[in-house]
Image (cartoon, rainbow, N blue to C red):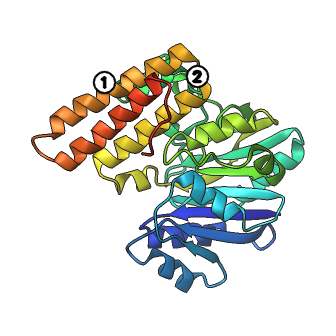
Amino acid sequence: MIDAVVVTWNAGEQACACVEHTRDPELVATIVVVDNASSDGTADAVRAAHPDVTVIALEQGVGLARALNLGARLGSAPFVLYLNDDVLAEDGAIRSLLEALHARPDAVAAGGRLVNPDRSTQDRYRPRPFPSPATVVARLLGLERLWPRNRWTGAHLRQPLGDRRTADVQQPAGACLLVRRSAVERTGGWDERYWFWYEDVDFSRRLAAGGASLYVPSATFRHVGGATARRLSAADGHARYYHGALRYAGTWFSGRGRAAVALATLAVSLGRAALRVPFDRREARIYLRSARSALALLCGRSITRA
């Protein structure tokens, strides 16, 4: 019934554990691991530990969206399970997602509950409403970090969904998402113009045009959280985040919303560039590239790659 797709980068042990917890002979037809140009032998490690798993070893890094699409195209099962490599499915979790979709023919996607090792819910990864321009600007300015329950980005914390009942949501966590293949094909899959960040929000928003998305709290997945981001330098991580925010704003917001996101990105990028010039010119150039992308959005031009 299910083709599972896992994207990994320089995380051999983590990817192997993810694959091990994804195995379910009754439900999972294939598991595809897309190694996004690792330099530490991740692809070989997965092949050695799981010789029956398909491994796509990319020679050059690509955006997460493109890697997920590459993996999904190799299968033909009626459902596709997208997993981050730092997610471990607990017993019955995958079946719970599938049963939720079987019970709701109008639903196109189902996401699980991400938990800590003690099985407490990770609040940061609870389902959220689709972001507005104010939401994106607040995140760019660091308000979510300083004031988690603020009115613009903290709705999922102020009024969290219960952990017992399946509910319709706008944006379930993209780290473990089961989607009908028919919906994937109808939307064209993940938008490959994104690199890393906001691609899951965009995907959920396009899926919503074809049906409901569900939050299934009985489907629990242990989650490290931010594992890939921590392997990036601060500047590289920020650049990918800014690119995603700009791309999302350019796709979904009107003129004023786009301008607000572009101006916020321009301000934070230039500020960080100025701070980094005396210490690391490479990082300063990365921030300046983000500033140029913000100016491009402000002027109605195409955005450069992250």
Count of number-bearing discs? 2
Helix, strand or loop at label 2? It is loop
What residue is at 87 percent from the left and 49 percent from the top? 102
Q: Quadrant of the C terminus?
A: top left
What residue is at 58 percent from the left and 18 percent from the top? 254
Which amino acid is tagged 1? Ala
Compared to residue 75, the image places residue 189 above or below, namely above
What residue is at 47 percent from the left and 37 percent from the top? 303
Q: Is residue 96 visible?
A: yes
Q: Is residue 150 visible?
A: no
Compared to residue 288, the image places residue 141 above or below, namely above
What residue is shown with label 1? 267
Residue 98, image x, y percentages: 80, 53
What residue is at 62 percent from the left and 60 percent from the top? 89
Which amino acid is tagged 2? Phe
Direction from residue 17 to residue 144 in the image, left or right: left
Q: CA distance from mark 1 to mark 2?
A: 19 Å
Compared to residue 80, the image places residue 306 above or below, namely above
Query: How crowded is the residue under tag 2: few (<14 C-alpha within 10 Å), some, or many (20+)?
Result: some
Q: Which mark is residue 253?
A: 2
Is 37 in front, or is 60? 60
Residue 113, image x, y percentages: 62, 45
**Between discs 1 and 2, the one toward the N terminus:** 2
Query: How crowded is the residue under tag 1: few (<14 C-alpha within 10 Å), some, or many (20+)?
Result: some
